Image (cartoon, rainbow, N blue to C red):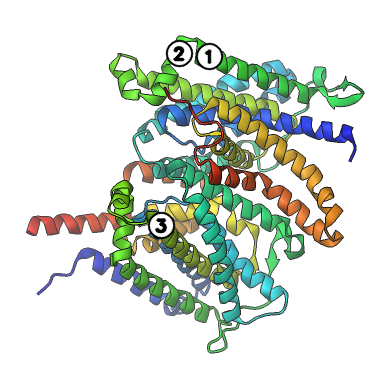
């Protein structure tokens, strides 16, 4: 295994982690504030990718695709929240899981009807289709763009939550919703705002992932499960946990898949390594999560109270 | 004279009709219905098992399809090596299922609420990807099973025999579940659902009770998986897909969680509904999805749960 290959895989892992962070941030915020679990978050990501692919295909402008896809996903999220989800905030988690499970079935079938069962292709924008030379290492510039966008969102969220009035209300709403409401803050509007923000981030993730994955019905589920692993590992409700958790999961998953089969071949019989390698590699992050939960059930970076 | 309660009548009629499916199907010349209802009965077994922890224990496992997969793959892998004995299939499935359930149960039960839902889901995904990576046993495409399990004493070769075998197991599960939830063990489990801290303060080692319930419910799903592999002669990763776990929960909530017969009513209702919808359009999921949302929003008690509640209201008025 060469060093450059390792670095490339590490960058791939970072890029997957950043993508996961965009999803995990929205999911964990909604959970932290409203105590609501939204399995349909992956569907919003899928809708974002479809909006972006459709717009990009029609106009050829990636910027325009982004300008349409992100607000459209945000709007879709807010509409869904107002119609159905708002009635579920006070229900138990089982009802929330079940209702959003129904929404996933609905959205998957909806895109199948509108765009067909086959995957829709979305090209990399021309300006970013080249590679970047990094100390003699060639890496696609589009993937760098994903990393850049994700880091910018991370910084933006940090500033929003820790340095603005809205962020203060969000933090307060997460721990003491009744008091915040009693102080005259419109908690309903705050909830919708947070939900819209999460939906917008999911749309952004869909837009950025569009050119590197296949845009197809059901594309939201595998990544949703990874996102759940991220927020459980990182600590539910914590943005910091979502960020570090996403990076850990992204890098462990990518590096594991790339190198574990080779590594096992070093000290296992060839046929056994060939069978066990991919199996263990695909289970690695779940094993990681199980270990984290066994040692720290609250996650690695739980919300700091007080 | 004691008046019969509505729900007893409904439960009796439901099970009676299920018992009569093969003769009715033969009479109207639609043998396909036997296969359809075998699937319903098999999934009802799994739903009854999951309901034990979900309905009575308040533990929402979103990963019980994993145990259906373990049952199915036990039959598949043993048959692949030429072992057709059904008792061996069942023993291997229950053995593997028990070990997996104890290990996963101990880890999952460290969490509660939301995290429990997510971690059970994640473990089921892990099993799903593990099955996909088993290239020797079909990987993504699944594993074809040459023949049904051979139980020696009786043969499952005919579809009707398999149906009655599954129906017998369902009836046994219902009887056992009914006994269990009214036993001391069941009371402790239900107490833990209402107020776990109080139960712990009373001195009950709740983890042990919850783990036992978790393992029992997992093993019931394993049995359902063994039956499913016999019905389809196939074991596939999709048995463990998270939609399958979701479907089980839908059945329970639709029928009425925390009732013994509810999951059976839910399984019949959901699959018959799916079957009718898919006759109208290939895009039936676009109706099913919102229907699930509506059920959650409006019919909290479920079909059978509604009857139970009505009976209890009547009993309250009479007293």
Q: Residue at x 56, y 18 (%)?
A: A157
Q: Which mark is residue A166?
A: 2
- Tag 3: Cα neighbours inside 10 Å, few (<14), some, or many (≥20)? many
Q: Does residue A290 appear anywhere in the picture?
A: yes
Q: Where is mark 1, residue-wise?
A: A160
Element assignment for label 3: helix
Report the quarter where the C terminus of chain B lies: bottom left
Element assignment for label 1: helix
* C-alpha span from label 3 to label 1: 42 Å
Q: Residue at x 67, y 23 (%)?
A: A55
Specify the subunit that label 2 lies on.
A
Image marks 2 and 1: residues in contact by CB distance under 8 Å: yes
The residue furthest right is: A136
Q: Residue at x 38, y 30 (%)?
A: A86
Q: Where is mark 3, residue-wise?
A: B210
Q: Residue at x 63, y 24 (%)?
A: A204
Specify the subunit that label 1 lies on.
A
* C-alpha span from label 2 to label 3: 42 Å
């Amino acid at each position: 295994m060469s060093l450059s290959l390792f670095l490339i895989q590490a960058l791939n892992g970072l890029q997957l982690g950043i993508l996961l962070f965009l999803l995990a941030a929205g999911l964990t915020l909604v959970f932290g504030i409203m105590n609501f679990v939204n399995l349909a978050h992956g569907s919003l990501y899928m809708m974002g990718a479809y909006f972006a692919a459709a717009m990009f295909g029609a106009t050829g402008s990636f910027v325009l695709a982004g300008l349409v896809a992100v607000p459209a996903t945000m709007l879709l999220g807010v509409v869904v929240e107002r119609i159905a989800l708002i009635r579920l905030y006070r229900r138990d988690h089982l009802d929330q899981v079940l209702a959003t499970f129904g929404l996933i079935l609905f959205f998957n079938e909806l895109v199948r009807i509108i765009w067909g069962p086959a995957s829709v292709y979305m090209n990399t924008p021309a300006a970013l289709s080249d590679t970047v030379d990094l100390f003699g290492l060639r890496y696609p510039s589009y993937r760098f763009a994903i990393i850049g966008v994700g880091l910018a969102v991370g910084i933006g969220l940090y500033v929003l939550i820790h340095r603005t009035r809205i962020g203060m209300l969000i933090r307060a709403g997460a721990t003491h919703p009744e008091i915040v409401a009693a102080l005259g803050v419109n908690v309903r509007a705050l909830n919708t705002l947070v939900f819209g923000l999460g939906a917008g981030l999911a749309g952004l993730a869909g837009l950025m992932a569009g050119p590197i994955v296949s845009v197809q019905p059901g594309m939201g589920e595998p990544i949703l499960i990874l996102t759940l692993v991220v927020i459980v590992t990182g600590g539910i409700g914590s943005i910091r946990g979502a960020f570090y958790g996403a990076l850990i999961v992204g890098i462990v998953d990518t590096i594991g898949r790339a190198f574990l089969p080779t590594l096992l071949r070093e000290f296992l019989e060839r046929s056994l390594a060939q069978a066990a390698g991919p199996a263990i590699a695909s289970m690695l992050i779940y094993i990681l999560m199980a270990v984290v939960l066994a040692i720290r059930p609250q996650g690695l970076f739980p919300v700091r109270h007080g | 004279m004691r008046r019969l309660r509505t729900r007893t009548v409904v439960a009796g009629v439901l099970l009676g009709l299920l018992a009569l499916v093969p003769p009715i199907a033969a009479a109207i010349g639609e043998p396909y219905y036997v296969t359809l209802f075998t699937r319903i009965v098999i999934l009802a077994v799994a739903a009854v098992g999951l309901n034990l922890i979900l309905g009575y224990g308040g533990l929402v496992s979103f990963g019980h399809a994993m145990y259906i997969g373990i049952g199915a793959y036990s039959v598949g892998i043993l048959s692949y090596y030429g072992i057709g004995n059904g008792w061996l299939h069942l023993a291997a499935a229950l053995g593997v299922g028990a070990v997996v359930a104890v290990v996963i149960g101990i880890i999952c039960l460290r969490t509660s609420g939301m995290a429990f839902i997510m971690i059970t889901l994640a473990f089921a995904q892990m099993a799903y990807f593990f099955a996909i990576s088993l290239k020797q046993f079909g990987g993504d495409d699944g594993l074809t099973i040459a023949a049904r399990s051979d139980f020696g004493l009786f043969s499952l070769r005919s579809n009707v025999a398999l149906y009655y075998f599954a129906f017998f197991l369902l009836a046994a599960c219902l009887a056992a579940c009914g006994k269990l939830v009214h036993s001391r063990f069941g009371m402790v489990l239900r107490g833990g659902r209402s107020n776990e801290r109080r139960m712990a303060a009373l001195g009950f080692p709740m983890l042990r009770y919850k783990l036992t319930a978790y393992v029992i419910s997992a093993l019931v799903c394993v049995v359902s998986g063994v039956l499913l592999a016999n019905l389809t002669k196939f074991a596939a990763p999709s048995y463990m897909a998270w939609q399958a776990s979701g479907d089980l929960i839908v059945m329970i909530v639709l029928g009425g969680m925390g009732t013994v017969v509810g999951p059976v009513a839910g399984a019949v209702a959901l699959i018959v509904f799916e079957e009718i919808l898919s006759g109208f359009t290939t895009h039936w999921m676009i109706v099913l999805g919102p229907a699930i949302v509506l059920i959650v929003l409006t019919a909290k008690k479920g079909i059978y749960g509604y009857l139970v509640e009505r009976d209890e209201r009547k009993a309250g008025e009479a007293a």
